[in-house]
Amino acid sequence: MQLPELARYHRVIAPDLAGFGFTECPVGTTFDQGVWLQQVVDLLDALEVARVHVVGNSFGGSMALALAIDHPDRVDRLVLMGSVGVPFEITDGLDRVWGFDPDRDDMGELMRNVFAYDDSLITEELVASRQQASMRPRTRAAFSAMFPEPRQRWVDAMAHDEASIRAIKARTLVVHGRDDNVIPLQNSLTLLDWIDDSRLHVFGRCGHWTQVEHSTAFTELLLDFFAE
C-alpha cells in the first residue's frame, strides 16, 4: 500500500524472491540466502540500477542486510522493519508463520492474533486473498521446502555476524512494532547498537505489520528519511 505514494517521488522496484509471490522459479531451485542475494544483484544489473534505497521487512530485512554487507556500493539508504538478520530465539509467532499449513491452520486467526495488534484491520477480503495465495500448489511446495522443522536453524541461517553488521556504512532506519509477536523488539535494539549510522522508530499499539497498521505514518517516515 506504500508503493503508489513512494512512486510519486522515487522509482520503486518490488521483486518476488524465489519461492515467494507468484513468480515462477526453475524446478530444483535451492532456497537460501546466497541464491536470493544473487537474484537481487542480477535484477539490479538487468535494470541497470547502480545504487538503491533498500527496504526490508521481516525475512526481507535479512536480505537487505546481506546486500548492504556484501555489496555496500549498491546501497544508499537502508530501512529494516521488524527485521530478521541477528541471532535470536525463535518466537512462537514466527514458528507458527513459517509452519503455516493452509489445510490445517486458520489464516484469519493467524493474521488477527499473530500479525496485527488491532485485529479490526484484518478484513475478510484480506484474509481470503491471503488464503487463496497460500493454496497455490507451487506456493505451498516452495514454502514447505524453505522452513521445515526445527525452524530455529532457519533463524540462525538468516543471521549475520556482528562484525559484518557493524561494518555497514549505509545510513539506516530501523522500524519496529512494540507489540510484535513475530520478531522481538530486541532485534531492532541490537541493530541500533550494531549499526553506527542508525536510528530507531518504534510504533506503540503495533504488531508485525507496521506498514499496514500505521500505513500513513510509515510512508511519511520513509519519505522523510529518503529526502534527508
Image (cartoon, grey):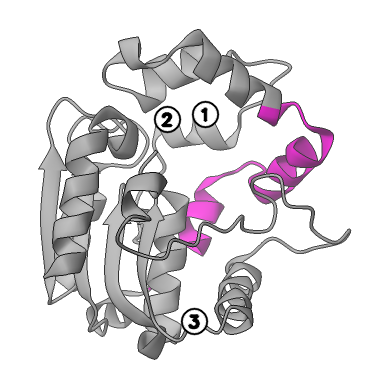
* Residues shaded magenta: 133-160
**Is residue 107 at least partly visible in the picture?**
no
Q: Which residue is mark 3?
A: 49
Q: Which residue is mark 1?
A: 96
Seen in the picture, residue 183 relative to 197 is either above or below; the reply is: above
On the image, the x and y values in percent for residue 134 come to 68, 29
Which marked residue is nearer to the observer: mark 3 or mark 2?
Answer: 3
**Amino acid at circle 3:** Val
151 part of magenta stretch: yes
Q: Which residue does the image show at 61% across and 74% down from the upper left?
A: 43
Q: Disc 3 vs disc 1: Cβ atoms closer than 8 Å?
A: no
86 part of magenta stretch: no
Seen in the picture, residue 52 relative to 85 is either above or below; the reply is: below
Q: Residue furthest right?
A: 27
**Amino acid at circle 1:** Arg
Q: How many marks?
A: 3
The kind of secondary structure the magenta stretch mainly shows is helix
Q: Which residue is mark 2?
A: 92
User: Does label 3 or label 2 sit earlier along the sequence?
Assistant: 3
**Amino acid at circle 2:** Asp
Which structural element holds mark 3?
Answer: loop
Quarter of the view holding residue 139: top right
| Alpha carbons under labels 2 and 1: distance apart | 6 Å
73 left or right of 46 in image: left
Q: Disc 2 vs disc 1: Cβ atoms closer than 8 Å?
A: yes
Where is the N terminus found, in terms of image quarters? top left
On the image, the x and y values in percent for residue 120 come to 32, 10
24 left or right of 185 in image: right
Which marked residue is nearer to the observer: mark 3 or mark 1?
Answer: 3
